[in-house]
Image: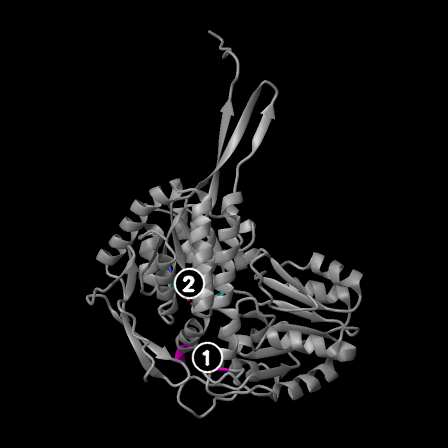
C-alpha cells in the first residue's frame, strides 16, 4: 500500500512520538481488505507512567494559563484539523473502514467543531458573585487535573476531540487511550494540538486494550475518566473509578426507539431510519434500531425501505461514490452474524440483506427485518451493525410504553406532522438525546449523552463544562467575626 499509515511511534507523550516495542504488538487492519496497514505496541507500565507523569507536570502550568490563551490554542488546532480534513478523513477511513463520503463530513470536521466550540467559550467560563448582605461569596471554576479519555472504535477522531476540547478548555490535561481496533487517528489529533501551540504533555495518547484502560482508570493521579464504549465496559470502568471517587462521564450503548406515526412524511421517515441504522454500517451508539411504525403505514414503509436500500453503494470506501462500507473487524462481523441467526430462529422476517459479501474484508449487505416483536433478542440487545428492525404499533400510549421498556436510554426519535404529539411523545420517552423529524444529528452546540444504563454525564455544549471542572466556593466576611468565646 503506497499510503503510509504506519505512525512514527505507537504513543504520543510529552509532545513527541514514543515507542516501546516491549508492549504487545497490535496489528491495525484495513476493514475493507483485511490487510495489515500498521502495527503499534500496547503501552507498557513504563509508557503509562511516562504519560501520566508528563500530564501531571504540564497540567499545573496550563491551569494557570489564561483561558483566552487556552481557547486560542484550541481554535488554532480546529483550523489545522479542517485544513487537513482530507488527509485525516482518508486515515480515518483506513482505520475504521467507514466510507470517505462519510469521514469527509463527520469525523475530523466534527472534531474541529468541538475544538472550535470549546476554544471559543474558554474565555467566558467564569464563576458567580453571590451577595449575602454585607458579606458575599464567589465561586471559581477550577480544572479537575489529569483526565483520562477512553475511546470506542467507531468515531476515533471525533471521540478524542469531544473529550479533549472541554478537558483542555477547562485547564485539565488528558491521557487518551483509543480503541486497540482504531489506534491511528488520535495520534494525528495529538500532533495537531502540539502544532497549534498546546504545551507538551497536555494531550498524551497511549495505545492498548482493556488492561491499559484499567491501569489508567485506577491510577490515583487521575481525577476523571471519560469512557465511550459499551455498557459492560462502562460498568467495569465506573466501578473501578468509584474506588477513588473519580469523576466520570460514561457514553455507553443503546437500543433506541425511532417512532414513525402514520401521519409522518414517509420519505423523511425513511431517510431518518436509514440515518438511524445504516450510516457507518450501523455502528453508531445512538442508532434508532427499534423502528416502531404505526399499523396503517407499516407495509408501505417496509416496501419503500426495501426500495431505498437498493441505493446503497457498497464498494471501495476510498471512492467517494461509496456510501456503505464494511464492518470494523472480523469480530464485529461475527457478532452481527450471530444476531442475524438468532433473529431468523426467533421468527423475524428478513425482507432484504444481511448476507456476507464474498470479498476480502468484513462486508455484509444492510439488513431489513419486519415482524419484529419486543421479546426478540434483536429488539432487546445492541447489535452494532447494519440491521433495521421494524416493529408495528397501534397507538401513542402503547408505543411510548414499549419504547421505554429497555434498560438503555441513549436516544429516541419521532416522526409525525402533529407538532403537539411530537413534543408530547418526546417528553415521555426515557432518553438523553432526542430527535423530532430527524435522526442522529450531533452538533457540538447540543448536549449529548444517555440516561438509564446508557450513561452518566454529558458531552458537548456548555453541559460538558460541568463534567470537566469543579466549583470552589469562597465565603468572604466583610466585618468582625462573632464567636461564642
Ligand atoms: P468497548 O466497551 O469494548 O470498549 C471501549 C473502550 O474501553 C476501548 O478502548 C476498550 O479497549 C476499553 N476498555 C475495555 N475494557 C476496559 C477496562 N476494563 N477498563 C478500561 N477500559 C477498557 O466498546 P467498543 O470499542 O466495542 O465500542 C462499541 C460500543 O461503544 C458500543 O456498545 C456503542 O454503543 C458504544 N458507543 C457509545 C457511544 C456514546 O457516545 N454513547 C459512541 C460510540 C460507541 P479495547 O477495545 O482496545 O480493548
Measure the alpha-carbon separation of dots 2 and 1: 17 Å
Residue stretch rendered in magenta on the structure: 325-331
246 shown above or below 17: above
Q: Do the CB atoms of the residues marked 2 and 1 lie less than 8 Å apart? A: no
Residue at 37%, 72% (x, y): give it.
181
Location of residue 338 in the rendering, given as x and y in whole percent from the top left corner: 48, 80
First in sequence: mark 2 vs mark 1: 2
- Which disc is residue 327 wearing? 1
The answer to which of 24 and 268 lies nearer the viewer is 268
Counting other residues with Cα less than 10 Å from the Cα at mark 1, is it few (<14), some (14-19), or many (20 or more)? Answer: many
Asked if one can make out residue 248 in the rendered structure from this viewpoint, the answer is no
For ligand 1, give the image quadrant.
Answer: bottom left
Q: Name the magenta segment's main secondary structure.
A: loop
Location of residue 310 in the rendering, given as x and y in whole percent from the top left corner: 61, 89
The answer to which of 37 and 61 lies nearer the viewer is 61
Q: Is mark 2 within 8 Å of ligand 1?
A: yes
Number of marks present in the image shown = 2
Element type at mark 1 = loop
Q: Is residue 327 magenta?
A: yes
Residue at 48%, 57% (x, y): give it.
115
The quadrant in which the N terminus is found is: bottom left
Location of residue 268 in the rendering, given as x and y in whole percent from the top left corner: 70, 75
Asked if one can make out residue 275 in the rendered structure from this viewpoint, the answer is yes
Q: Which residue is mark 2?
A: 151
Residue at 48%, 62% (x, y): give it.
112
411 shown above or below 303: above
Amino acid at each position: 500500500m503506497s499510503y503510509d499509515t504506519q505512525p512514527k511511534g505507537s504513543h504520543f507523550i510529552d509532545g513527541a512520538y514514543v515507542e516501546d516495542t516491549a508492549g504487545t504488538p497490535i496489528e491495525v487492519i484495513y476493514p475493507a481488505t483485511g490487510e495489515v496497514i500498521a502495527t503499534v505496541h500496547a503501552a507498557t507500565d513504563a509508557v503509562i507512567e511516562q504519560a501520566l507523569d508528563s500530564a501531571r507536570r504540564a497540567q499545573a502550568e496550563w491551569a494557570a494559563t489564561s483561558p483566552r490563551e487556552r481557547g486560542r490554542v484550541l481554535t488554532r488546532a480546529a483550523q489545522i484539523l479542517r485544513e487537513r480534513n482530507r488527509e485525516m478523513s482518508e486515515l480515518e477511513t483506513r482505520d475504521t473502514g467507514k466510507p470517505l463520503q462519510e469521514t469527509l463530513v463527520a469525523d475530523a470536521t466534527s472534531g474541529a467543531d468541538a475544538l472550535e466550540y470549546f476554544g471559543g467559550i474558554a474565555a467566558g467560563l467564569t464563576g458567580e458573585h453571590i451577595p449575602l448582605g454585607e458579606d458575599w461569596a464567589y465561586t471559581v471554576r477550577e480544572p479537575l487535573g489529569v483526565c483520562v479519555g477512553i475511546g470506542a472504535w467507531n468515531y476515533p477522531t471525533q471521540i478524542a476531540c469531544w473529550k479533549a476540547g472541554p478537558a483542555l478548555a477547562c485547564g485539565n490535561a488528558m491521557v487518551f487511550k483509543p480503541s486497540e481496533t482504531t489506534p491511528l487517528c488520535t495520534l494525528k489529533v495529538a500532533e495537531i494540538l502540539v502544532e497549534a501551540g498546546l504545551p507538551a504533555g497536555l494531550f498524551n495518547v497511549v495505545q492498548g486494550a482493556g488492561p491499559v484502560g484499567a491501569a489508567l482508570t485506577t491510577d490515583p493521579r487521575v481525577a476523571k475518566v471519560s469512557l465511550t464504549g459499551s455498557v459492560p465496559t462502562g460498568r467495569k470502568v465506573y466501578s473501578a473509578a468509584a474506588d477513588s471517587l473519580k469523576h466520570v462521564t460514561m457514553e455507553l450503548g443503546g437500543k433506541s426507539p425511532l417512532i414513525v406515526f402514520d401521519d409522518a412524511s414517509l420519505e423523511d421517515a425513511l431517510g431518518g431510519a436509514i440515518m438511524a441504522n445504516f450510516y457507518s454500517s450501523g455502528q453508531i451508539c445512538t442508532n434508532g434500531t427499534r423502528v416502531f411504525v404505526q399499523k396503517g403505514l407499516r407495509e408501505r414503509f417496509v416496501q419503500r425501505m426495501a426500495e431505498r436500500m437498493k441505493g446503497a453503494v457498497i464498494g471501495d470506501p476510498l471512492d467517494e461514490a461509496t456510501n456503505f462500507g464494511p464492518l470494523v473487524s472480523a469480530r464485529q462481523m461475527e457478532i452481527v452474524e450471530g444476531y442475524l441467526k438468532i433473529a431468523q430462529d426467533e421468527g423475524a422476517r428478513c425482507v432484504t440483506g444481511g448476507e456476507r459479501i464474498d470479498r476480502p474484508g468484513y462486508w455484509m449487505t444492510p439488513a431489513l427485518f419486519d415482524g419484529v416483536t419486543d421479546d426478540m433478542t434483536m429488539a432487546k440487545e445492541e447489535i452494532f451493525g447494519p440491521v433495521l428492525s421494524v416493529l408495528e404499533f397501534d397507538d401513542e400510549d402503547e408505543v411510548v410504553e414499549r419504547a421505554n421498556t429497555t434498560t438503555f436510554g441513549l436516544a429516541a426519535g419521532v416522526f409525525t406532522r402533529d407538532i403537539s404529539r411530537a413534543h408530547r411523545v418526546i417528553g415521555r420517552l426515557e432518553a438523553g438525546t432526542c430527535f423530532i423529524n430527524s435522526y442522529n444529528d450531533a452538533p457540538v452546540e447540543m448536549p449529548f449523552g444517555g440516561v438509564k444504563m446508557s450513561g452518566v454525564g454529558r458531552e458537548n455544549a456548555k453541559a460538558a463544562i460541568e463534567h470537566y471542572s469543579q466549583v470552589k466556593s469562597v465565603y468572604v466576611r466583610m466585618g468582625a467575626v462573632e464567636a461564642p468565646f
